[in-house]
Every structure is written in C-alpha cells, then in structure tokens.
Amino acid sequence: MMSPSVLLLLGWMLVPLTMTIYFSFLRYNLLNPGTESFTGWTNYYYFVTDPSFTDALVNTISIFGGVLFITTVGGVGFSLLLDQPMWKSGLIRMLVIAPFFVMPTVSALVWKNMFMNPVNGFFGQIATFLGLQPFDFFGQAPLLSVIWIISWQWLPFATLILLTALQSLDRDQLEASEMDGANSFSRFIFIILPHLARPITVAILIQTIFLLSIFAEILVTTNGGPGTATTNLTYLIYVQSLLQFDVGAGSAGGVIAIILANIVAIFLMRMIGKNLE
Amino acid sequence: MRAISNNRKALNTAIALTLGLFMSFPIIWILILSFKSELDAIGNPLQVLLSSWTLDSFSTVQGRSDYLKHFSNSVIISLGSTFLALLVAIPSAWAMAFVPGKQTKNILMWMLSTKMLPPVGVLIPIYLLFRDYGLLDTRAGLVIILTLINLPIIIWMLYTYFKEIPVDILEAARMDGAGLKQEILYVLTPMAIPGISSTLILNIILAWNEAFWTINLTASNAAPLTAFIASYSSPEGLFYAKLSAASIMAIAPILIMGWFSQKQLVRGLTFGAVK
Amino acid sequence: MGSITLKNVTKSFDDVEVIPQVNIEIRDGEFVVFVGPSGCGKSTLLRIIAGLEDVTSGVVEINNQDATTLPPADRSLAMVFQSYALYPHMSVRKNIAFPLRMAKIDKAEQDKRIETVAKVLNLTDYLERRPAQLSGGQRQRVAIGRAIVREPSAFLFDEPLSNLDAALRVEMRLEISELHKKLGTTMIYVTHDQIEAMTMADKIVVLQAGVIEQVGSPMELYDKPCNKFVAGFIGSPKMNFLEGSEAEKYNAHTIGVRPEHISISAKEGDLLGTVGVVEHLGSDTYLHISCENSREQMIVRANANNGFKYGDTIHLTLDVKNIHRFNNHGVCIYETP
C-alpha cells in the first residue's frame, strides 16, 4: 500500500535532481538549442566567481538571519503574553496568527504599495501629516524592508509553535519551582526557556528551509534590486535560468542551493527522527 | 488554581489585543480600503476613515472576467492537488501506522527529506519537462507539482494521527466480532476522519498560498490568485481600492480555514515534532 | 458452555520466551483469576485465549474444540480492556449495540437486549451520551455492558479496575462478582492485585515469569501455599519469613507465619523485638517489629487496643499450628517434622 507514494516521491526526487546535476556540467542556453556540450566545472566556476553570487549569498544569509532573529525573539515574547489568562483569547490569537495565512504575493504587495510607498503609503501619509520627510523604504533600505515583510509572515508561525509548546508545559513544574522560591524571572530562565529550547530549534530549522527559498516576496517588491541589493540565491538562479536562459549556470546554482539546504536539513531531520521513537 | 483578578485579566487582554491589532493591522487596513473609492483610498489615513463606503471595487474586480478565472484556478489547483495527494497518502500512512515494518521509520524520514529539497534546485528540469510535455501554464501541471511537494507533509500528518488511534480499540472491535472490512468501515474510518479532515484543511491552505511553482510555471491561463496578484505589482498596484478588494477576496477563504486549523497547522508544519 | 483448555501452550516474542509452557483447564461457569507481578505473562495468556496473540506452540480449546487458529471474532468470547477501549465516536447505546450489529441481530432484538443490559448496569440514563462525557466508573460499566450484551460463552477481563480510584474499585469488584453469580458465565480475570484475586475468584492461577506457580481456590492458596512465592504473594499484609535458628527448630530452611498467627505480649514469648511504626486501621492494628531473628521488619496483626507504641519492647509467640515450612529451594514441606 505504500508503493505508490514511495514511487511518486522517488521519481520526484531522482528525475529532476539527476537532470539538474547533468545540466550543471553542460554549456546549455535555451536561446541556442542544440548546441549543448560538456564543459566540466565551468558553470560552477562561472556561477561562484560572479560577484552577484557573493551578494546573493550575503543577502540570503542576511534575510534568514534577520528574519530568524525577529521571529524567535518576538515569538518567545508573543507566546508568553498569549499564554497569560485573558478574555477572548481565541479571537486575539487569531489576530496575531492571521498574517501567516496571507499569500506571499498579497502580503508583499500590500506592504510595498499600501504601507511603504513614500507618497501614498500609510507610513508616508502619516509622515507628511506630521510634517516629516516620508521615508523611502525600498529606496533607502530595500533589504531591511524585505526582511520586515517576511518577518511579518513568519512571526505568527513561531508564536503559534511556541504557544503550543508553552501550553504543554507541566503546570506542576512551575508551581514546584515557585515553592522552591523562584521568582518569575528565574522561572523564565530555568524552567520556561529550557522547555522552549526544543520547539525554538524546530521553529528555526523549519523556517530556515522556507527562508532559503524565499522568492515571491522579492519578485513582487524589488525584482532583486536595486542592483543586487535584495537578490537571494533562489532569485539569482531564477534570473540566470528563466530570464537569461542560461540553463547550465542556473543548474550549477541549483546544485549549490541543494547542498546548502541539506546542511540545515541534516540537523532538522535528526531532531524529528528522535521524536519518532 | 489561584484566582486571577479581573484587573490583571483586563490588563492582559488589553496588551494582547493591542498586539493582535498591530499584527493584523495590514489586513484590517486593506479590508477598509477595499470598501473605498480609488480617490479616497490614496488619501491620508484620516480621510480614508472618514470617507464614504462603497462596494464598487468588489464589483469592478469581480466584473473582470479574468478574476473569476484565476479564483477558480486557485480552487481547482488547491482542491485537486489535495485530494490527489490524500488518495495516494492515506493507504501509505495507514500501512505505516498499523503494519509497520523494519524500514518504516527510514521510509518516513526519507519522505521528509524530499521536502527539504529547495524548489529552485529542480526548477530548470521541471520547467523543461513541463515545456516538452505541454504542461506549462496548465492546471493539470500545477496539480501534479503541488501534489508532489505536499505529499510528504500529508503522509506525515496522517501517520501521526493514525498512530494515535489506540490498538486496544481495534482489538475490542475484533473481539466484538468485527471482521477486517467491518473494522475499517465502522471503527477505523470514523476515528480517522478528524485527522484526515484537518490534514485536508492544512493542505488546502498550503496549496492555495504556494507562490514559487505557481508563478514560475504559469502565464495567464492556469495562473491561480498568487500569480495573478503578483501581476498587480505594477502599474495596477497603484489602484489601492481594487488591489485591496482583490487581495481580500484572495485571502478570505484561507483566513476562515486558518481559524479552524491553528493546532493542526503546528502539527503539520513541524512534522509532529511539536504537538 | 464456556470451558477453556490450554494444552502445552508456549509463547515467544522474537527470541524472548515469555511463556515456557502452560497447561490450564477452566471449567464452564468458573471465575478464574490470573494473578502475578507485572511482566509475569498473565496478560499475554489472556490475549492468547482471546485470539489477539498467536501461540508459538500448543493448543487452545474452547468448548472442547480446537480454537488455536480461530480469529478473535469467531471465538464467542467478550473482553473488557484496561483502557475500556470504548469507541469514542459512538454513543453508549451504539457502543453496546456494536457486537450485536456485527452479529447481524435484528434491530428490535438489539434494542430489547440493550435496555436489559442498561438496566442491569445502571446505564439507562446515559445511553445517548458519548464515552468522553462519562466518568471512569461509568465507562467501565459500558465496557462491561458491551461484553455481556451478546451473551458470550466466556468473559475476559484485562486488569479492568486498575484505572479506577480505590473506592470505585471496591464497588466495581462487587458488581462484577454479582454479575458472575447472576449470569453463571465463565469469567477469566487478569490482575496484579491479590486482593481482587482473593475476593472474586473461584480459582486462582498464580503466575511468575510465565510459569504457573500454583492453581487453587483462594483459601487453598492462603492455607496451603506450595512455595515461598505464593505464600508471600497471597495475603495482606504479607507473610513473615524467618530463617536460621528459629527455622531450624522446625526442621526447615525458612518458616513463614502470617501476621494474624502471632500473639504479642509485653512479658514473655519466643522472640524479642522492638516496636516500629504502629498502623491503626480501626478494627485491627498492624505492628511493624524489628526482630533480631528476621532480616526484614515483621508485621503482626493485633487487636485495636493493644497498648504498644513506637519504641516499646515486645515479645512474640508464633502459632505453631499455622507455621509454613519451606526447604532451601523455597518449596513448602508438608509432612510433619
């Protein structure tokens, strides 16, 4: 009964993967079909030494570093707050979680046009109203703006995971520590934070998998620009292969992306595997 | 349990509500803008709030024949890929949960590893295969891709749900005289339905919002809402009211489903590592 | 009709032998309790009878017919699980009706039988509820109702009371015993609690490490345990064991005396000891006594107002008629010394 799904996933994994690896060693441009030839490591050399690769690598790391910092710190804070006794907690939780359900293109476009646009955007209007110079988010701080939009989508995810984990914390443990004389700060440091360590790791690893592949947000807001200011690895490969039709270099980039993702994946798989016991 | 004073609760509620409104403010704001005229929508926030309300933007967006086309593309692609994936996944998850073999855990982990493959790594081969087999810009093509990328999550979620059905109950059914067919029909299936339906909902959400393959593999015919909204990025994006109305219609169904699936979301996206 | 026989049954999981070889004969209408410490194989034995577990070798006969390979559904046995194993998506009525539905009994007959069972078990008011809305005791009753409704030839109980609190356990114990008297159907009951075994059984099977230590009526096991294990396992508080010079007096390696077969005195007796903890139960008082002849503290069941308190010196006299003697293998010696 398992074989259909195993076969499907095996095909999904092996066929395109093999093709990517094969293409990465070819001189292959979609504009000159029929001229494919073996070139060895040239594509890799070309892709890695291209200055935009370094930019893309730095941007990729900046994006997930920035987003992970905001979502983790924010997520811990938000989840602790939402775990407090309050009225209408279901409704409030939904308000906090809602951004996660917004499709990436909508959230990118809404932030870019309705909020960060220096003329008609919400922030621009407020600034003008207060007599201040409106800030041109995508002109002055494009990468930070992209990081902010992505964080807005993923902060709810981290919050939801950590809140779920908090709610599974054994209340007896907290009461025992209270009896042992721990104040609320010590309880946070010695009981709550250690309890959250695992879910935080899981949240970080899963986000990393998605954050390495951020695409729609960049396409909609900046097209990777100005220059390569917001081009990440995924976007660079997209440009190489589907805009410049250089299949060989794009494939070499794809292989590099796969290797990077696998480094993270190994850690994530270990954590999940432990949970299977 | 100690009594918590109402003052304390009120304070918590006020802080949390502020936070909630802050987080969902962009959504609330476009909801407001979607009921305004184009001219009012680009005014300053105070003018926006004070101006009159109208349904014009919704009727304009709906009036465009292509909006409905893209909406129905989204529906067909997300439902189609979800049902197809469930069809394949249910027997697998079932077998792994109830008749586990020595390799079951390894197979599960391997399935998960396919999810770690960055889509951009296989973008080119998939694009070329789609081009050669005439699947570019077709709904069938997207259904196939989304089925494949979400299959591991679906199998995992179902597996964790099936695993939770106590073996005792199945044995009780056997003792009560149920044969295999009756056991599946009267005991297993009804107990599995809640798990299957939350898997279904989560997967519809994921498929509806998928924005890498849907953008790269479609042009105009099969483009779902993700790709359609992306095309608003310029210059139509400057029509705030219409953009807002289109966005609200695109995200509303998912927000409603999301309301019902917060807990399942955690389980599905963490592969059962956080429950 | 409800006789069950196990002939030379063995069971191994992978390479681990859990039941070396067992022979049991259960007569129609008997209430048999399998008792033993956890991991002794009692549940495995029950599941073998139920058909939920295969035998590695040997024969299971039900009503004198070979049932070794019969699936559980065809054995006409009903089982009550430790976890109750109620169907969470069905109402109480549907839960009880399930075995009847499987047997394709017509609707009118089903309703009639459910009503009867519900009345017997005091479930009439709860028939439309879901299991999740019931208390532990009520769930237990539903599980029993589901078992008795189809009138099987024998009932199997797998530690059915271990999830209940102490008071309810006593109550349900009585109810199950009464049910047995009323129905007269064979019951096989697994427990680790020797009190349940003593109070309910017609016949007790004491198991240890997959081996039957002794089979007999409760009083037989109590009066004439065939080895030290059974002697120590049956009876509460536990039997006191003495070794060394005191045992040699009776020409044995070890002697055992039950707490109620020791008399106490402040002045004279066979043994000298110091009173430790004194437990007042109201009707009786248990004295825990440190005694130089015994490695462990001895327990004596004494009258409520015996006047002894912590730290007192005490003299003990053993009731010679009620001394159990064991050889160096722990086996009971019955011929007179």
Image (cartoon, coloured by chain):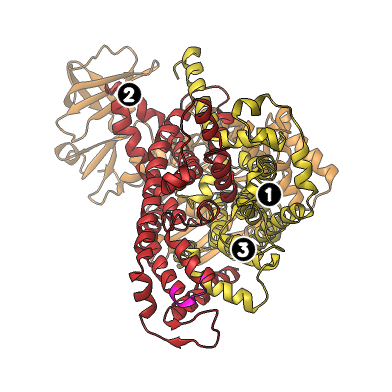
Between marks 1 and 2 in the image, the one whose residue lies nearer the viewer:
2
Between marks 2 and 3 in the image, the one whose residue lies nearer the viewer:
3
Where residue B228 sits: x, y (%)? 66, 55
3D distance between C-alphas at marks 1 and 3: 25 Å
Q: Secondary structure at mark 3?
A: helix
Q: Amino acid at mark 3?
A: Thr
Q: According to the colouring, which chain is red? A: A
Quadrant of residue C336 within the rendered picture: top left
Q: Amino acid at mark 1?
A: Pro
C212 relative position to C115: left or right: left
Protein chain holding label 3: B
Where residue B65 sits: x, y (%)? 79, 54
A115 relative position to C253: left or right: right
Where residue A44 sits: x, y (%)? 37, 75
Q: Secondary structure at mark 2?
A: helix
Tell me the magenta residue range: A244-249
Residue named by callout 2: A184
Quadrant of residue B220 within the rendered picture: bottom right
C309 relative position to B180: left or right: left
Between marks 1 and 3 in the image, the one whose residue lies nearer the viewer:
3
Give the class, few, some or many, for how many residues have Cα within 10 Å of label 1's Cα (few <14, many ≥20).
some
Where residue C156 sits: x, y (%)? 58, 47
The answer as to whether the residues below labels 2 and 3 share one chain is: no
Protein chain holding label 1: B
B57 relative position to A157: left or right: right
Q: According to the colouring, which chain is yellow? A: B
Give the class, few, some or many, for how many residues have Cα within 10 Å of label 3's Cα (few <14, many ≥20).
many
Residue named by callout 3: B147
